Image (spheres, grey):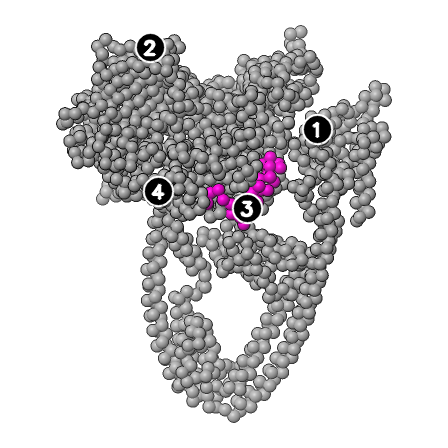
Amino acid sequence: MKFIRQFHIILILIWAPTLVFGVKESLFKTCENSGFCHRNKYFAESIKNEGSNYQSRYSIAPESILIESKLNTKIIHGQIIKDIPTLAEDFILPFELSILEGNNIRFTINEEQRHIADIKAINITNYRYNQTSDWAFVTSELPYLAENLFKVEIDQSKSEVIVHYGESNEYKAILTFNPVTLTVFYNDIPQVIANHQNFFNFEHWRPKESNYEHLTVEETDYGMFEDHFVDSENDKIPLGPESIALDFTFKGFKNLYGIPEHADSLNLKDTTDSDQPYRLYNVDIFEYETNSRMAMYGAIPLLLAVKPEISLGLFWINGADTFINVDKTSNEEDSSTHWISENGVLDFMIIIDKTPANINYNYGLITGFTQLPPLFSLGYHQCRWNYNDEKDVLDVNQLMDKHQFPYDTIWLDIEYTDQKKYFTWDKHKFPSPKQLLKSLDHTGRNLVIIIDPHLKTNYFFSDEVIKKQACINDSKNTTFYGHCWPGESVWIDTFNPTSQPIWDSQFEWNNEFFGLDSSNVFLWNDMNEPSVFNGPETSAPKDNIHFGGWEHRSVHNIYGLTYHEATYESLIKRTKGNTNRTRPFILTRSYFAGSQRTAAMWTGDNMSKWEYLKISIPMVLTSNIVNMPFSGADVGGFFGNPSKELLTRWYQAGIWYPFFRAHAHIDARRREPWIAGEPYTSIMRDAVLLRYALLPTLYTAFYESSKTGIPIFKPIFYEALTNPKSYSIDDEFFFGNSGLLVKPVTDEGADRHEIYIPDTEVYYDYTNRSLPSINVYKLDEPGYIKKDISLQDIPALIKGGHIISLKERYRRSTRLMVNDPYTLIIALNNNGVAEGQLYIDDGESFEFENSGELALVKFSATESTINSQILEINDTFKQKISSIKIEKIIILNSKSNKSIESISIKQGDEEWQAKFDGTVDKKTIIHNAKIKVSESWDIQLIYEPDHDEL
Amino acid sequence: MRSAAIALFLIASLVSGSGSGSVSANHEVVRGVSPEEQHLYRPIVDEVTGKKTWRCLSDPTIELSYDQINDDYCDCPDGSDEPGTNACPYTISRKFYCANKHHIPEYIENYKLNDGVCDYDICCDGSDEYLSGKCEDKCKQVHDQFESYKARVTTEVDESLKIKVQWEETADKLRQQAINKLSELRATFIAKQKQFEIVKQTLEETSDEENSGDEFLLAQVDRLNHHLTEFQNDIQLKDKYIAQLEQILAKLVDNYNPNFNDAAVKESVAGFQEYITNKDSGAGAGAGAGIDQIQSVADELKQYSLQISSHSETETPQVVQVPTFGNMLRHYYGQLRDAVNFEQNTYLNNNDNGNGNRNPILYKYEKELEDIGLEIETIELDLEKNYGPKDILRALKSTWVNTKIGDYMYKLGFLDAIYQGNNLIGRFDGFSSNQMTYSNGAKCWNGPSRSAIVNLVCGPSNGIVSVSEPEKCQYVFELITPIACQPVTEEGLLSTFQVDLSKL
């Protein structure tokens, strides 16, 4: 009796999570009920069960190998033969192996017979979609590695091809013919093996009637010609099964990252025992759950594997519905992943280098780096669904000043429109947009308005889009009608080149909608997954048809990118030649690899709960390590009403997000930061003021990222690769390369705080900007330090070895800070040295690119000298910033035990004695330094002679 | 008032004149400091060396070299060494002085100095941007704007005040009328009461016919009970149907897919949620409660009629205070009618004129007394109410302001209620200086009852200028009305005057 009862209890425990999440999960597919994932999982299981007896059906025909010289490079061509025992005919899968810049090796497999097959669905293209890279890559001309930089050998026995590449031939790739595997070596050690587990699967085209002849014993036909998911059973799957799958074994790697977007930990979880592999399928997921591998709004199929000496990137170049199974447990040393996509060509790139930062760089060479954002967009964004009318907007604008909150941007959600018709205004609420924009512009404020891809039917713009056939079509290739905010809507098809001029026409300079000649209006592109309220998984049916006859299933994850890129191009055209403020700002909810070039992202509709504040940190970290650094979560949480404490803590965390926006749902109570009252309002103000003070540092971090792809919200392990204990730290981060280490408080009522220090470097306490030099931490080995904290504390440390630039004076917005002086904080390291960079430009135009109007300054310091070197500047810009000074220099020296006698400053022909506070508790302050930031300078610190020596 | 302003102008012109006309002859004018405070910035001159120094204002132990004043670096903890720059953190007590020659001197926050913005609303002379000199002096234009604003406001307020005075007079009259009416009514009540007692006494002496109606009444009560039972069954059946329907809809609300935003489904869900919310908090007496109430009244009635009939056989009726049987019946019937809301179609009016079998003369008196009493009570309550200063709202008792804003027609009754279309936003709740509050409007789904704050702004006639809903179902109106007008003062004008930057 007793036993039975216990048994029941266990059952209930096991099922509980399913019950909790049941409702929402039922709206979205799982691997189990997605035909293509189900089949590949089944396939993998069969192969595992067969063990070493399994004879792969795929092999490379040795005679097919051909080395083509073109475009100053070499491309290796060949054919994989798929042999179905029951059929006479072999299926031919042509492949290409190439080396791209950054020592990125790319492997692409296509299907020869599919396009000649007799496919009855005449409206659609029967090729496999192969244009993903056109959207994801920075240029359409592939950056191939020059021919002379690598060599190709074909093995004597014709059983493999070997490619040597890298400056000192440190890379080697071996493609074996039977079984087909690709192993990439770095310094002669295998790092990754593709198809090590034989999960390679390539579903060739076959007529439905004779499907049974094409099935092998390892396969199931589940969902090959019909969709079993309740909300998409109308999907006729006209091209039948076309999935692709491949496994990758990462040798000696246990720490895997990336493949966003998921509300989950930074370090990827093992999913072998779960029915929830990581899924990449851009969806409008209502009230998403935390700690989940369910699909979300965006997808970047880049996986990062890290171990102390070597890092590895795997870029799966596919925009279709994709599941990734992560296996960290089957092998003691290695981990593996199984990638399953619904269709498209099989295309991937492997990047290997010493550090994850190098992977970001190499990957950035291919997909582009983040745009250097306009400076204002790094300020504080105030959003709400909705600021109701012009008066409301201007009231909030004024109250910001009244309460002395600097801010740069106020946002308008969908209610500003006339009945959700984009490119129109509700004339009663917003009678004079131009006047509104002008009023905001007076103090340097900007307006961001929302424009979504769903277009209400029956108004001028949707009429035009329909007329010019620039809509997404349904499976019959006629205009697709669905439901979204405005009710019945159509969707602009931004894969279609026709849509660009139509889109541009609405953005024209002097267009009344954008306030005529206003240059302070920017864009928010939401709902671009696309979100379709009456569609399967709240998105478009997969058999919808895009420009070129491509099924939606082939391009789903790319659509959001094409949409915000269209907006970017329109904005570029709008401002060019008309204003100096030419750098666009666009926030997008949906994104893909390459989105970083033109947009910022946020983590979508989160909730006003502590767990969402907590999860925002690994989410933003993940976004940063896949080269999408301009990212943030809605401060305060979108759904619900945060407690005053939660709101305050969220501001304190939010100031570190590269994208810092407060947002709230229409049903939420007002929560502009002055509403909470004291002490909360002052604490939130201190946080926002800290953000603004650090803008020079943040802007410099963006500059560096725009050149190298380095994360701005940077995981701890990036700076502690030799310490594997740091690999799973995802509740703290470095702020760019500044050395600022921050761990936001994300627990209710917290009064103790532990910060992990990943190395034995000296760290100076920077909590609340005060630099109490008694709190200098230097651990003998990496570990946690403990601090007492109160509500006003923003725990942060500065790592020794860095020099940080600040602008400490409060102004109403970033534009008004331009001429204010800098403060430098010099944090000397264990060896008594430090350095840092400062980047300056006009913050709004492309003159930094076009005519070199920028200043790049390098600061270096030792215990006795500080100097500045101008790495880059031109005369025009030097003139422009000639009045900007460095007013204060704070020197932190953990080892200081001598008093300073004098400090002299030399700039140009002038030399003068500085006023300073003598070293008190490891800290020296140089006052009123009067140094011009635009020219190089030197400082000498003269110490008093050591009395003990006498 | 005027002369004071002129005096300020004079001082202002002294300071911002070519720079030579300083307050103190022996040192330069310190930028950002008003003429009255220039003396705080006199240097301390060392007699021997001639070196000039100065001490932080709230911490004289800190001595600075005189050239540290306004050197764009903050040295004093109180920020007093930088009255003319933004080097020190802003404090409200340390603002930058703008002379604003041709207008009125003002003080501006130091963080607005040299930030590239011409803050003409404070510094019309552009002196806040002295480094770039990009802001030309616009004090003449600003002052013209101010003068025309002043003229406009003065005329408008004068006119409005006339209306206000009229309303106050009307209100006063109405109040007087009410007071008069009240004393009249009180007199009438006393007179009627006397007459009533005389008549009653006479009647009681002559009459004991009442019992004859008792049996008839008992029969009526039985019928009533019968009808009630039928009625009750009927309602119970309908309740069952409603419950079924609610169950169906509740299932829809729980299980519909919020992601598939079908407009019709969403509307039905929201409508049902609103219905449920209002249903629970609504009338209180749902059908179920009503039935119980009726049942208990009917039972009581029957009990009582039995008592009376047995009672009346043994004892003679007592005097005045004991309610007559007919009276009681009428009372219970009234309660029943209220509970069930039968309207005209009563169960008792077959062959009955509503006053049972009792004496029509007495009934008439009682009715009249009751009515007068009620009227007295109403007037007394009314006189105690807050109608604002001088009872002014009394003049607007039945005034409605109708304004179409956006998609809605807003109707605002001063002492009544505010409607958005047909939706009740709130009932008048209170009046304080320049603000009226309305509360207890129709309830919002998932939110509070609708409510509103009405901010009153002086203007020559009543009109809603704006309505906003900063939070769901909490409205803020701006109403222009003569009620809010006060005689114009220079200070008042200055505090409400806003520079129109677009016209500079």
| Kind of residue sitting beneath label 1 | Leu
Q: Are marks 1 and 2 in contact (CB under 8 Å)?
A: no
Q: How far apart are marks 2 and 4 (CA)?
A: 50 Å
Quadrant including the N terminus of chain A: top left
The answer to whether dots 3 and 2 both sit on one chain is yes
Boundaries of the magenta span: A421-445
Circle 3 residues within 10 Å: few <14, some 14–19, many ≥20: some
Residue at mark 1 to residue at mark 2: CA–CA distance: 64 Å
> Circle 2 marks a residue in which chain?
A
> Which amino acid type is marked by label 4?
Phe
How far is the residue under mark 1 from the one under mark 3? 37 Å
Q: Residue B131 carries which label?
A: 1
User: Residue A627 location in percent, x, y?
Assistant: 43, 25
Residue behind mark 2: A151
Which residue matches tag 4? A480
What residue did someone put label 3 on?
Answer: A430
| Residue A645 image point, x, y percent | 52, 40
Chain where mark 3 sits:
A
